[in-house]
Amino acid sequence: MNIHEYQAKELLAKYGVPVPAGHAAMSVEEAVAAAKQLPGPLWVVKSQIHAGGRGKGKFKELGEDAKGGVRLAHSLDEVRDHSAEMLGKTLVTVQTGPAGKEVNRLYITDGVDIAREFYLALLVDRESSRIAIVASTEGGMDIEKVAHETPDRIHTITVDPATGLMPHHGRAVAATLQLDKDLAKQCGKLLASLYEAFVGTDASQIEINPLAVTDKGELMVLDAKVGFDNNAEFRHADLADLRDLSEEDPMEIEASKFDLAYIKLDGNIGCMVNGAGLAMATMDIIKLNGAEPANFCDVGGGASKEKVTAAFKIILNDPSVKGILVNIFGGIMRCDIIAEGIVAAAREMDIKVPLVVRLEGTNVKEGKDILASSGLAIIPADDLGDAARKIVAEVKQPA
């Protein structure tokens, strides 16, 4: 689960992380009222969407010459004008794709005079099974460019879970960011607060870009991106209210109700698979045969007939789907149960697109018999390669 910048800063502030004063706003009037609560005379009006690159983004409705989704305001009138231009408009950034995202929330913050900018992030390093601290002196909006062109300027330090964060980690990050004396002490304190927040909320990511040194010699978090591990949601009922469903794909929201792992993609072949690794292999072999998957859909190892039916409904609600490939390896999951679900869903949904099914594993003969005797136009496949070739051929046939 991801949250908005203003929510991330409010959360981090509870752990002692220094952030500028700011207030969220859902309307132009609220934005002006928020600015009045801040000292001024400089304010920052920030679009709130779940995507980076907002400062360099463009609003679809305003043209290429318009300002981006993060703007400075030197008066309350400018706060009003910027807010009116942003709210309800579609912001396109390098992370949203061409469709962009509609701006329904703003964040009005106190302006800060910046002396230096850095990049700092805490992430889960799956290779080492540790929390990784990523730091760079090259903070700001072009960190992706830095990572691509000068990766040597980005440094990674991992934290042993047996010891947790130690003072030497803070000193190492301070040295990486070329901070000394009081700023080095501030860096160690800030890093400790970020680490406590990361562990305390079961975060998967805390990204600070930029972390700034102000003209007053203070370290300040000017932007924050925070995401949480969905598997730990049961421990954090207090964080559930931070979820903004308007930022999520409706089909992904529906899938979450049935404990389905579903991600919308850009292709036209719907995939229903049990197991994330098998799902990745299925998408790869579809691409190998010259087509594109329309989704990642993992029904899990213990899918019921109802769960399979729900998965079919979600996949078919995507108008771009021109065919469906079901690839099931029955280990824990029995192939006959999957077959019953496929037949039930096909009948209930009155599937009009080609449907190729590959079953293997526990009770595979019974499963194939159920499909064969269903009377439905289900195309059986002998193996994954055969399944991919068949569904790609069906989808590429002229209408």
Image: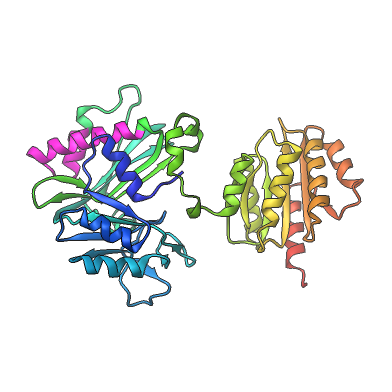
Q: Is residue 228 left or right of residue 257?
A: left
Q: Position of residue 8 (x, y in %)?
A: 34, 44
Q: Position of residue 49 (x, y in %)?
A: 40, 56
Q: How many marks overall? A: 0
Residue at 41 percent of width and 33 percent of height? 202
Residue at 73 percent of width and 33 percent of height? 333
Along the viewing direction, whichever of 41 and 375 lies nearer the viewer? 41
Along the viewing direction, whichever of 345 and 88 lies nearer the viewer? 88
Residue 217 magenta: no
Q: Position of residue 167 (x, y in %)?
A: 20, 28
Q: Is residue 275 left or right of residue 75?
A: right
Report the span colored magenta.
170-198
Judging from the image, the colouring scheme is rainbow
**Residue 118 seen:** yes
Q: Residue furthest top?
A: 162
Position of the C terminus, as image quadrant, is bottom right
Picture quadrant where residue 175 is located: top left
Magenta residues, dominant SS class: helix
**Residue 46 seen:** no
Along the viewing direction, whichever of 30 and 22 lies nearer the viewer? 30
Q: Is residue 320 left or right of residue 211?
A: right
Up/down of 303 relative to 104, above or below: above
Along the viewing direction, whichever of 302 and 238 lies nearer the viewer? 238
Q: Position of residue 283 (x, y in %)?
A: 62, 52
Up/down of 46 relative to 122, above or below: below
Residue 192 magenta: yes
Picture quadrant where residue 339 is located: top right
Residue at 32 percent of width and 40 percent of height? 11
Residue at 32 percent of width and 58 percent of height? 30
